[in-house]
Image (cartoon, coloured by chain):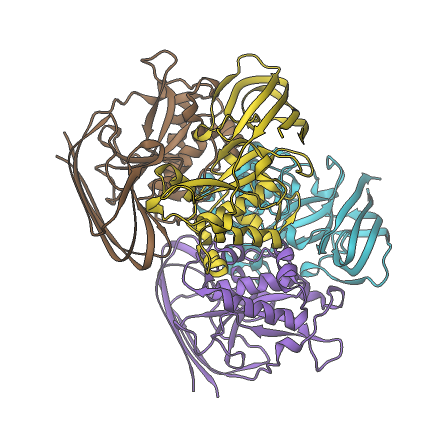
Chain colours: A purple, B cyan, C brown, D yellow
Amino acid sequence: MPIAIDTRFDFTLDQPTDIILQFEAAAVPEQTILETTTQLNCADAARVPAHDGVGERVLFQAEGKIEVAYRALVEVKRLVPEIAGLAQLSPHDLPGETLDYLLDSRYCPADRFQPFVEDEFGGTAGGARVQAIHDWIAQHFTYELVSTASTTALDSFVERRGICRDYAHVLITLARASTIPARYVSCFAPGVNPPDFHALAEVFLADDTTPGGGAWYIVDATGMADPTETVKIGIGRDAADVSFLTSFGASQFGDKQVTVTRT
Amino acid sequence: MPIAIDTRFDFTLDQPTDIILQFEAAAVPEQTILETTTQLNCADAARVPAHDGVGERVLFQAEGKIEVAYRALVEVKRLVPEIAGLAQLSPHDLPGETLDYLLDSRYCPADRFQPFVEDEFGGTAGGARVQAIHDWIAQHFTYELVSTASTTALDSFVERRGICRDYAHVLITLARASTIPARYVSCFAPGVNPPDFHALAEVFLADDTTPGGGAWYIVDATGMADPTETVKIGIGRDAADVSFLTSFGASQFGDKQVTVTRT
Amino acid sequence: MPIAIDTRFDFTLDQPTDIILQFEAAAVPEQTILETTTQLNCADAARVPAHDGVGERVLFQAEGKIEVAYRALVEVKRLVPEIAGLAQLSPHDLPGETLDYLLDSRYCPADRFQPFVEDEFGGTAGGARVQAIHDWIAQHFTYELVSTASTTALDSFVERRGICRDYAHVLITLARASTIPARYVSCFAPGVNPPDFHALAEVFLADDTTPGGGAWYIVDATGMADPTETVKIGIGRDAADVSFLTSFGASQFGDKQVTVTRT
Amino acid sequence: MPIAIDTRFDFTLDQPTDIILQFEAAAVPEQTILETTTQLNCADAARVPAHDGVGERVLFQAEGKIEVAYRALVEVKRLVPEIAGLAQLSPHDLPGETLDYLLDSRYCPADRFQPFVEDEFGGTAGGARVQAIHDWIAQHFTYELVSTASTTALDSFVERRGICRDYAHVLITLARASTIPARYVSCFAPGVNPPDFHALAEVFLADDTTPGGGAWYIVDATGMADPTETVKIGIGRDAADVSFLTSFGASQFGDKQVTVTRT
């Protein structure tokens, strides 16, 4: 059952400004892009692999009103085990490329939360710890549009409110404070309400099918997205790395429409 | 004229704790490691490539007193042009792997500084901009041990004080706010006072010897290290990525001795 | 030439919520309230003197839609000397009741700015220092609605943008860092654009007409308000003390209209 | 059983610097100062009433090494009811002079904690709410010297560690978020370990002996001080208002000795 994506957005630049966009389904093994169309009224856009090679960044310098339209049909074939049963890998058993995802990042100051996770989730580890973090957020947080570009997981933790970006940041932060690699995933998913680009987390846990191996598993603290239907756009250490629009200078955002449906 | 490094430090862990160390000269083209000895009283340490493949991380879980001793002799062959004359590359001309270094990171919230850099350094670009940032920091900052693990470039910018870590964070932040990729380098260098691990910045500018090409150039806002004698340990988006000691749990730091001499 | 004030605003409370309002011209010696009408659709409102006895706070608990209308005609007789010529009083010569205004407050973390004021305004003192701070803000800041309820003077200082509240916070912070008492004034003033409640600062400097004496002098870093036409509502250590609406629970703000005219 | 206080401390000023000290037992009704001696090697110190008229501030400008010695014998007659049984007063029933203690201050950003207190302590009010906050802090916090002059209640809440200052800030913040006036008390108390100046909170609740009345009640989240033996130095909205040493310029702190004993 492929997922149909139809999104358009525009923004205006008063003077020539450098822009990075990342808004398209990524070519990763567990999702097959059946059809895709991107329209962008801007010549000379460069494309480069995005963070850790997942998805692409579209780069250009432009002025005036920029309109972006993107349609795609994507087949998702993602295995989704029960997370709670998966073991944790010690840092010295982790693949080297996952270690950056244990460290603090712009919106996820994880080191400050070590006493909290010990205190609150002390009896758990691995997937059970992640599940406990997930449940704690689900129980204590209210979905509310209160965050700005400066809001960190620390702010959201204190205020116990936020949107998908903030839910993901808190889960990532508490997972890293538990010595579990965690990263930020921007994505499309049906069922997101209000419809928009979505964000959730991935954690790195032992792969129970491969002795000694590990894998990234999706966790959505908001509960809105089903991992088997989630279309990844990109990944990063947090939202700073996979914003759908990064502007090096002032920009006025216009309209945005995101429609994601099961076909 | 090789650089001789002799460093030792110890720390104590009250319970089994996961540790990441990164304290050795990196094997990168512009520095040749002539001799090296590492002593670490800890079995079962794993080694993996560090951030972006520069240097190595040493990983283990241990308890009790851990002692680390490292000696090396390193030949540095680094070309150091006048930075002020180098041009800036537009984001869409940058190699994809440098783009992460334009984005905000844990200690470098660059997006908030766009108005400041325009206001203060508006007439400059590229290497001249970096030179202006360097000079502005040199003129306005006092070298003083006031920072903690939570201190960001924003804090240091306001307080106009800090140590090498903070000087580097401010320079990186203001460079990124100027759309110039900038990264953090942990290193050994003779002349650092008081003697210790050192930190400085690298910026990505046009390479005047290769049309269309670019390269990373060292800039030390503290003025203490000479780039031709600087031995790189590792690089990162900021200090969070290349701490010489990252502890996933409480640790008591003991002694540290760092001696770096021209032989 | 009296100042005519006509303001109305409303807000909605989903459940019984405690509210503090402070929105009326204060009865202080230098302004005479010629006419005044307050309408508030809420029984049982208490009135108490506001911060330091300037103006009144209106207190009540209510639910549903609350509508406030206030009209007044106020004669302002405020002497406004050239600030730049006034001397500074040493802390030990200050009246005891001004000392709190030297200390850090919610939005004005002044102690962190001592190195900055020394570095930037080192050759000046007293009124000349305040004038230099005023001019520095006027030159470097852009009036832009970017702040939230959490934005401090530190944030505004870094981003060099804000509204009247933020301009006042930065001026107050830099004055206190210069050992000059400074406080926040909420007010009505003609010429404020867009029309709204306004905020500016008062600094405590030597009164050149009374040997050994001192007085509070208005300074508006935005340049929009003329002190001889400014109608004070209240004063505080910063905006936290004189918000026109403080809600102890969720509230939805509705419309607001503020008209201030010279008659 | 009077309390004997013997304290001395010194600090050095490299250049003439303005200083505010507040380190002596306050003359308040519930404590009688039987004997007192203050020695301060500094001429021309002024004395003014401190925040809200409780205790005194000593003001001077000096250079060089300043030595302060203070001895006193104080009889404390403070009634200490069971807090958990006391009712809460609605803001519109509070005395006007307590309202500032409902508002945010430098270290106590209470407004951000409204969702948390509702979520965590939702079924309680008044003294029972304060008791629940006290118990929650006692259960979840570790007494550890991790804070700096910039550490707010938000930082301590996240890190769940701190000293008496931080325990008091968190309790004050959560009480204010619960619409209960709360203030900071600097004090001497026997049993403080390690011996030092101490800090705790006071909350304003209904006085069960006076219909409609209210009073301030001591609460020590650290559990170290007994309210019947606590000698108040001063009060404030938070630590910014009652620091024993405020320096308007650089100062090097020397030794400090605080001995408080039951006689």
Q: Residue at x 70, y 40 (%)?
A: B226
- Residue farthest toward the left in the current orientation of the protein: C263
Of A232 and D55, the residue lying toward us: D55
Of C233 and D73, the residue lying toward us: D73
Of D25 and B198, the residue lying toward us: D25
Q: Is residue B247 above or below residue B158?
A: below
Q: Left or right: where does residue B230 sit relative to residue C118? A: right
Quadrant of the drawing holding the N terminus of chain C: top left
Residue A100: percent from the left, percent from the top? 65, 61
Residue B10: percent from the left, percent from the top? 81, 47
Q: Is residue A49 visible?
A: no
Residue D185: percent from the left, percent from the top? 53, 36
Q: Residue at x 58, y 35 (%)?
A: D230
Residue C235 in which image quadrant:
top left
Q: Residue at x 23, y 36 (%)?
A: C25
Residue D197: percent from the left, percent from the top? 62, 33
How many marks do you count on the picture?
A: 0
Q: Is residue A36 above or below residue C93?
A: below
Q: Residue at x 76, y 65 (%)?
A: A92
Q: Is residue B193 above or below residue B7?
A: above
Residue B159 in which image quadrant:
top right
Q: Is residue C115 visible?
A: yes
Q: Left or right: where does residue B111 sit relative to residue B63? A: left
Quadrant of the drawing holding the C terminus of chain C: top left
